Image: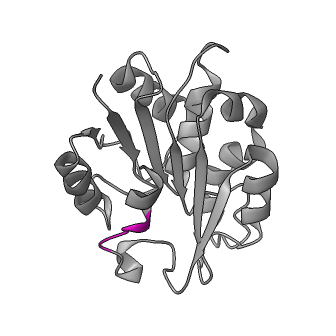
Amino acid sequence: MTKRVFIIHGWDGNPNDCWLPWLKKELEKREFEVAVPEMPKPKAPQIETWVEKIKEIAGKCDEETYFIGHSIGCQTIMRYLETLPESSKTGSLVFVAGFFNLPFLETEKEKSIAKPWLETPVDCDKVKKIAKKIIAIFSDDDPDVPLSDKELFKKKLGAKIVVLHAKGHFSDDAGIKELPEILEYLR
C-alpha cells in the first residue's frame, strides 16, 4: 500500500513556501507519494473552498494517508477530517504553527478573513478518532500564534506537543527552509 502525504500550506502561502519543497523531496526519498496543492485564493482563505480542495485531491483516506499542515493549513485539515465518515482512519497528522487563536492580527481585513476560522467550532473529538496520531509543533517566538495554543492542541486533540526555539512562524520570514523534526514524527 502506498503511503500518501498531503502538505497544506498556510494563509498567503503556496507550495514553494519555506520548508514545504524540502519536505516534499525528503518524503519522496522515503517513497511517500506527496501532494502539495496550491490552495484557492491563499490571500483570503475560506473554509469551504480549502476543504473542498483537499476532498478533491485526497480521495479515499486510510491509515497510509498522512496530513501535514502549516498554520491555517492545520485548521483546513481538521475541518476536512470532520467531513469524513465516523469509521474513517488516517495516519499521523503533523500540525506546524497551528492555531485556535490569533490575537495578534492587526488589520480589519485580517480579522475579517480569520473570523470564520476562529469562530466556527472544530469537532476535535472526531478528528482525534480518525487520526492515528497527532503532533503539534510550535515555536517559542511565533509572532502569529500564541504559545498557549499548545495547551489547546494537547487538551482538545490529545496531540504530542513539540516546542522549538526561535523558529518564528516557521515561514520564509523566519528563514525556515528545512524542518527535519517532521520526519522524526512520521516514522
* Residue 147 place in picture, x, y as percent: 71, 73
Q: Which residue is drawn at 28% across and 27% down?
A: 2
How many numbered marks appear?
A: 0
Q: Residue at x 67, y 33 (%)?
A: 127
- Closer to the camera in the image, 114 or 139: 139
* Residue 154 place in picture, x, y as percent: 76, 55
* Residue 142 place in picture, x, y as percent: 59, 77
Residue 113's place in the image compared with 164, above or below, is above
Q: In which quarter of the image is the N terminus?
A: top left
Q: Quadrant of residue 86?
A: top right
Q: Which residue is drawn at 54% across and 40% down?
A: 76
Residue 129's place in the image compared with 36, above or below, is above
Report if residue 53 lies within the magenta region. Answer: no
Horizontal side of residue 164 vs 154, given as left or right = left
* Residue 131 place in picture, x, y as percent: 60, 34
Main SS class of the magenta portion in the image: loop
Q: In which quarter of the image is residue 179?
A: bottom left
- Closer to the camera in the image, 50 or 176: 176
Residue span colored magenta: 177-181
Horizontal side of residue 32 vs 6, given as left or right = left
Looking at the image, the residue that sits furthest to the right is 155
Q: Residue at x 47, y 27 (%)?
A: 63
Looking at the image, the residue that sits furthest to the front is 187
